[in-house]
Image (cartoon, rainbow, N blue to C red):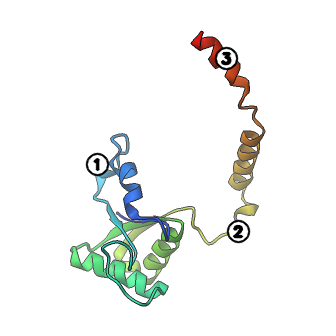
């Protein structure tokens, strides 16, 4: 699996997720966390266009003898993962998008459900539990 983080987020931020013992992903496949061009120790170029960046990923795969992979990402990484899989369909078995699909989510039930949960959390009286905590400490 190739994983791409959000645009200004270093890929190393996802190490704890993929290294967590409860995450069974590493039991089934290798995971490569890639940084974008011009980030960290990656190659430095003047261009940041989508096609060049998708080609960077395929060059990485070629250099590491990866013939097929699942690709995924978070935020901008999800958009780049989708574009890479579309431009190089014969190299990818699937795409995982975390917060990045090119859809207007306002018309989907899960979006409204999430909005309701956020509203409920915003309306919670978080100080209500303070009295109970004080009693526990006494």
| In this picture, residue 45 sits left or right of residue 132 | left
- Between the C-alphas of marks 1 and 2, the distance is 35 Å
Pointer 1 or 2: first along the chain: 1
Q: Nearer the viewer, residue 4 or 132?
A: 132
Q: Secondary structure at mark 3?
A: helix
Categorize mark 3 by other alpha carbons within 10 Å: few (<14), some (14-19), many (20+).
Answer: few
Q: CA distance from mark 3 to mark 1?
A: 42 Å
In the rendered image, residue 14, in percent from the top left (x then y), is placed at 40, 56
Residue drawn where x is 41% and y is 64% of the image: 10
Mark 3 and mark 2 in contact (Cβ < 8 Å)?
no
The quadrant holding residue 65 is bottom left
For image coordinates 68% across by 23% down, the residue present is: 130
Work out whether 129 lies above or below 120: above
User: Which residue does the numbered mark 2 point to in the structure image?
Assistant: 104
Q: Residues within 10 Å of mark 2 (few under 14, many from 20)?
A: few
Q: Disc 1 marks which residue?
A: 27
Q: Is residue 103 above or below residue 88?
A: above
Residue 132's disc number: 3
Q: Which mark is residue 106?
A: none
Mark 2 or 3 closer to N-term? 2
Q: Quadrant of the N terminus?
A: bottom left
* Image quarter in which the C terminus is found: top right
């Amino acid at each position: 699996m190739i994983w791409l983080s959000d645009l200004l987020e270093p890929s190393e931020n996802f190490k704890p997720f993929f290294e967590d013992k409860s995450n069974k992903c590493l039991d089934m496949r290798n995971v490569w966390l890639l940084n974008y061009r011009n980030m960290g120790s990656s190659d430095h170029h003047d261009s940041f266009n989508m096609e060049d960046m998708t080609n960077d990923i395929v060059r990485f795969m070629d250099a590491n003898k990866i013939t097929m992979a699942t690709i995924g990402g978070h935020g901008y990484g999800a958009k780049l993962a989708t574009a890479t899989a579309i431009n190089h369909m014969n190299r990818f078995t699937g795409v995982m998008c975390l917060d990045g699909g090119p859809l207007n989510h306002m018309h989907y039930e899960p979006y409204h459900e999430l909005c309701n949960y956020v509203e409920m959390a915003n309306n919670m009286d978080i100080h209500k539990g303070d009295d109970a905590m004080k009693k526990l400490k006494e």
